[in-house]
Image: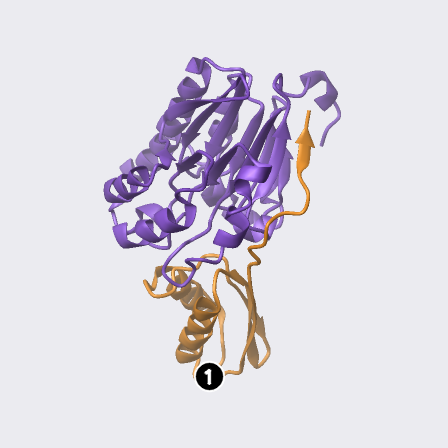
Amino acid sequence: MIRIAAVGDVHVDKDVVGRYRPALEQLPDVADVLLLAGDLTRHGTAEEAKCVASEFGDLGVPVVTVLGNHDHQCNQAPQVVEVLEGAGITVLEGTSTVLTIGGTRLGVAGVKGFGGGFAGRCASNFGEPEMKAFVGHTEAIAERLGAALRSLDCDVRVALTHYAPVPDTLVGEPLEIYPFLGCYQLGQAIDSAPTALALHGHAHAGTERGMTPGGVRVRNVAHPVIKQAYNVYHLAADSHPVDASVLVGRH
Amino acid sequence: MTVDEYTEAEIQRVLTEDVDIAEQGITVVRREHALILCGEVESEHRRDEVVRRVRELVPGVPVTCDIGIIRAQAPSEVEELS
């Protein structure tokens, strides 16, 4: 069994340093790994990244993260990554990592993701260059996530994104902004491999639980959604997507 | 002053785009002669800054703050995913 702790959207800056630490000190007793679903900072500066590093570094368990949209605000993503990696935090973007936990190989593939919307109500790669750039970014990121998941050599696969791969976990958000919160292409990428669990953040007013069309469990771990320092999920060593036949009749 | 749709849009944009705020999770509820701010942020300082900035934008309009601070305690339960 693998114990995964996860949280996203912690938006750390100087005023938040220390808030999570008491709960994080307990991590080694309750989890084997901590996955962070992006938006670690408020504006994506190296200074804020140092606050993240002091809060989420040196925890006694591996920490793996993706960046979120806030982490790109100041166009300093490379510096943010450098600070995080310097603190021993693994940053994924179209890449993956494998951790061996009690003899089980946990593979985590991650991307930031992007918006675009969900099947039948989404943006198309058509028209003005700006629109094609928007959807092209979505498509390229999703393709990288799918490739990273499929190429993993591991026992249990987890997908980590900032943006949502399904609309289920957006319930509570205004319908009008769904296209800015996620895209179906991320779900399609997750379903292209036998993924056991997909974790994301970004949708602060959303819902914790959802499932991809292919039966992969999705959890929105945005801090305002889970309302605690992190959630812990126990995954069996042979975890795989739910049998798609049980999804018949699901609405 | 009255708070119309354009003012509400401006408030939402300022809450996100003002570098001292950068909050995307605040809901602005327009009542007949007042504004209510809802949502959750990571610190009291950020909550106070949101309220201060909105009051600047709508002078004379009563602004009620119902913004919470997100709890950060350790979980007491886990979810088993078989």
Q: Is residue A59 left or right of residue B78?
A: left
**Residue A151 seen in the figure:** yes
User: Residue under mark 1: which chain is it in?
Assistant: B
Q: Residue at x 54, y 17 (%)?
A: A103
Residue placed under numbered mark 1 in the picture: B1
**Foreground residue among A157 and A144:** A157
Residue type for callout 1:
Met
Q: Residue at x 24, y 46 (%)?
A: A76
Question: Percent x, y for residue B79?
Answer: 67, 36
Q: Spot the residue most to the bottom.
A: B60
How is the rendered protein coloured? by chain
Task: Chain B: give its colour.
Answer: orange
Question: Percent x, y for residue A81?
Answer: 29, 40
Q: Residue at x 31, y 50 (%)?
A: A50
With respect to residue A172, does A209 lie above or below?
above
> Image quadrant for the N terminus of chain A?
top right
Q: Is residue A39 left or right of residue A1?
A: left
Task: Chain A: give its colour.
Answer: purple
